[in-house]
Amino acid sequence: MTRVAVGCPDYPALASRIASRAEQGEIRFATRFKPKRADELIGGRLHFIVRHTIIGRVEILRFEDRDDGRVDIVCRGMLERVHPQPKRAHQGWRYLTDDDAPRGIDDDSGLGDLPPELYRELAELSLI
């Protein structure tokens, strides 16, 4: 699933926001409606779009109804960096197939520290 990280200019800002709002290792994102495919999303990932690029993701743990009629998407409070992938901004959420989801950056190569724009340019040149 994807979601736009409104007001975040880059990955460090998104990571800081998630870290500051996480409580007991979990973070909640309120939404008006429960996704129709909620059951199959549990254990999946919520990907964040910043400046038309998917840059990070968190694991979806569960969905909880709120007293005000909205729904909380409860996620693990730790942001995982992914290989930047272009994605248009949108409202609400969109589903990603496993084939369309970006890979996580889990190595010590330093590629994850590159700015998304530079990473994208190097990938387009087949240098990474």
Image (cartoon, helix red, strand yellow):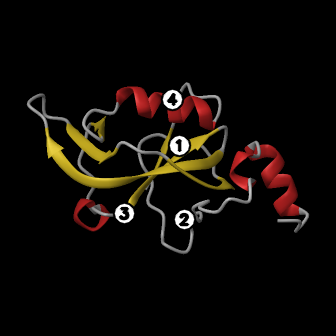
Q: Left or right: where does residue 102 sit relative to residue 64?
A: right
Amino acid type assigned to the residue bearing label 4 in the image: Ser
What x and y, as percent, mark residue 109? 74, 59
Numbered badge on residue 48: none
Alpha carbons under labels 1 and 3: distance apart: 20 Å
What x and y, as percent, mark residue 51? 67, 37
Q: Left or right: where does residue 9 sit relative to residue 127?
A: left
Numbered badge on residue 44: 3
Q: Is residue 88 above or below residue 99?
A: above
Given residues 49 and 10, the one toward you in this image is 10
Alpha carbons under labels 2 and 3: distance apart: 10 Å
Label 1 crowd bin: few (<14), some (14–19), many (20+), radius 10 Å: few
Alpha carbons under labels 4 and 2: distance apart: 23 Å
Amino acid type assigned to the residue bearing label 2 in the image: Ala
Amino acid type assigned to the residue bearing label 1 in the image: His
Pair 1/3: label in front:
3
Q: Earlier in the sequence, mark 4 or mark 3?
A: 4
Q: Is residue 58 above or below residue 44?
A: above
Which residue is depicted at the point 59% across and 65% down?
A: 103
Q: Left or right: where does residue 21 sit relative to residue 51?
A: left
In the rendered image, the quadrant that contains the C terminus is bottom right
- Secondary structure state at the residue bearing disc 4: helix
Numbered badge on residue 16: 4
Give the labeled residue for mark 2: 101
Q: Earlier in the sequence, mark 4 or mark 2?
A: 4
Which residue is depicted at the point 82% across and 62% down?
A: 123
Give the labeled residue for mark 1: 90
In the rendered image, the quadrant that contains the N terminus is bottom left
